[in-house]
Image: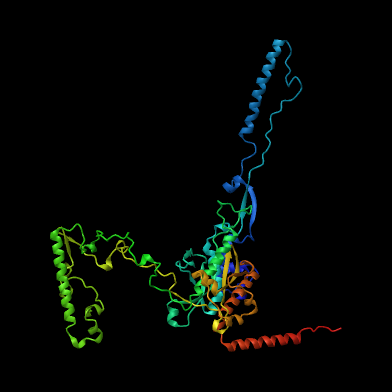
Amino acid sequence: MLAELEVDNEDAYREILRMPPLEGRKKPRIAYSRNFFASLEDMSRYWDDSKDHYYEVEANEAEHGGSKPPLPQSRQPAEQPNRHERMEVQASAQPSQNASVNGNSAITPESAGIPNVDAVALPTRPKMKQVYKGHRFGNGEQMNPGTRVAAVRNLLKMASHKFNCRDYEVSPKERLRIRNINLPSTYYSFCIARIPGEVKLARARMVEGPLIAVHSRNEVRFKSRDGLLGPTSDFVGEKYDLFREVAGMLMLAQQRAREGRELSKEPGEHQWWAVKARWGGGEPKWGHLPHEVFEDDDPTWSPQERELQMEKRRKEEEERIKSEAAASADLNNLKPEDLMSQSQPVSSASLERPKKKKKSGENGISSSSSNNKAEYRDGKRVVYTQPIRRKWYQEWTKIRPNGPTWDEKIIYKRIGIQDPQKGGSGWDDIYMLSAVNHHVCILRLSVHDNYLAWLESGKTQEQRSETRSKDTADEATKQEHILYLSRSRWYDLFDIQQRKELFVGIWRILCWLNRDGVPPEEYEKMEQRRRRKEEQDKDSGDHHMEI
């Protein structure tokens, strides 16, 4: 994979576009990184300025293509001498009249020996226009944000598949919860999680984790040219961008902390909207819906219609009682549970699987059974609406609690954290890839369980002194109420060496998080190889010269 990332960008682009290689170069072999280079080629159309060439042409030539600009001498300069001649004639006539009056001779340019020279039009500099010629289609701000996400996703896929992991989209229900406040989501673009070992769970597209989050920004500029953020500016700012990164990593830490917990589906005491009516406390009235025509408190019923409805309801109740009595007549088939629940007999027909509805007239069934459900109001028949076919405006009357915010396709696990029973200290390392423009960096956030408990309930958990004694020297100096954030350098995806370093960093993170899946024998073999290598380096290396 590293060998594929070392391929030159131009050679990879020509391979993706199915173009022949450049003269004197071999056709590169791209297998694992084909999708990555396809996204990188799309990104280069907006960010790769290595082939930019700007030059100036005349404005008319730029607008009309190959048309030549007009000549310097046009009609307007040719007409200017005639206008000057008329002005000179008028000026010469005026002195002659004055001279005749005064008795003096008029002095003209010809009499003075000065030649009459026409006005010369100076050539003006043509208007120039700057023209671009290069590889790009537009600037980076015009690029589709999904291109940047696809480039990082395809780079992660090269490594995640080797560790039995895959990417998944973030549920829009996920929120960063601080006590009773749900902050908005979309703090990261997608996540990496591990595929479960069970075949049934894997086929159901279930994942375990999450492991790593990816946060890709849609913004390109974070400051104005002056470096200031005005109250009316639309720039995000560096501080707010940092808060988004920290919030996304805290949301990922809360998801990992859900291991072994189940979300209660019962509404709590604070969820009053799930247990109480929302109609102002008044008694419900008939809502002019077809399925509510059976209500007894319909104020529009006439006395005769009310008697008909009550009579029909009594007949239906008698038929129901008879059917229940016939079902419970066979005492030999009754169980002890049925004898104990005689006060509330259950019909055997209700326990059977519902049969498929048949059309009227099939198998000798007439349509008279459907007429029994018909209702009459003021002498007119009202259409009966089955509960299954009720419209959306009939569903708002039902009171239900809010849907769960947890994703049902995720088996929440803290993969990569040390078990507290085996010496774990309660610190969880959260990793995130942060992408901006055409650069990517790696973030690590160390958060303690007490900090997450304080975010959720405002209280901290008591930690045993036994686990504190097993902490490492680095973790012993950390404070539980502080977040420790570290960031790597920004890696340029167009630079070959930098994207190789980024890929190596991603590979090492996945190795560290999935270290529990490696058997202990492999660790012993790795330790033996490391010791052998150190001994070989000592034997072959230069020794310090003693004086």
Q: Residue at x 26, y 59 (%)?
A: 287
Q: Locate the C terminus and report the quarter of the image it occupies.
A: bottom right
What is the count of numbered marks? 0
Residue at (79% x, 83% y) in the render? 542
Q: Is residue 448 above or below residue 381?
A: below
Residue at the image point whose x is 17% and y is 77% from the top? 323
Q: Position of residue 161 (x, y in %)?
A: 53, 77
Q: Position of residue 54 (x, y in %)?
A: 64, 54
| Residue 21 visible from this viewpoint | no
Q: Is residue 293 left or right of residue 508?
A: left
Q: Point out residue 294 in the picture as x, y percentages from the top left corner.
A: 20, 64
Q: Is residue 460 visible?
A: yes
Q: Is residue 36 above or below residue 335?
A: above
The single residue placed furthest to the right in the displayed view is 547
- In this view, the residue in front, 543 or 9, is 543
Colour style of the rendered protein structure: rainbow
The reply, left or right, for residue 146 in relation to residue 367 is right
Give coordinates of residue 117: x percent, y percent: 71, 28
Q: Residue at x 53, y 64 (%)?
A: 147
Compared to residue 387, the image places residue 108 above or below, namely above
Q: Quadrant of the N terminus?
A: bottom right
Identify which residue, 370 or 439, lies in the foreground.
Answer: 370
> Which of the pair 69/159 is nearer the observer?
159
Q: In the visual, does 308 lie left or right of 486?
A: left
- Occupied quadrant, residue 497: bottom right
Residue 546 falls in image quadrant: bottom right
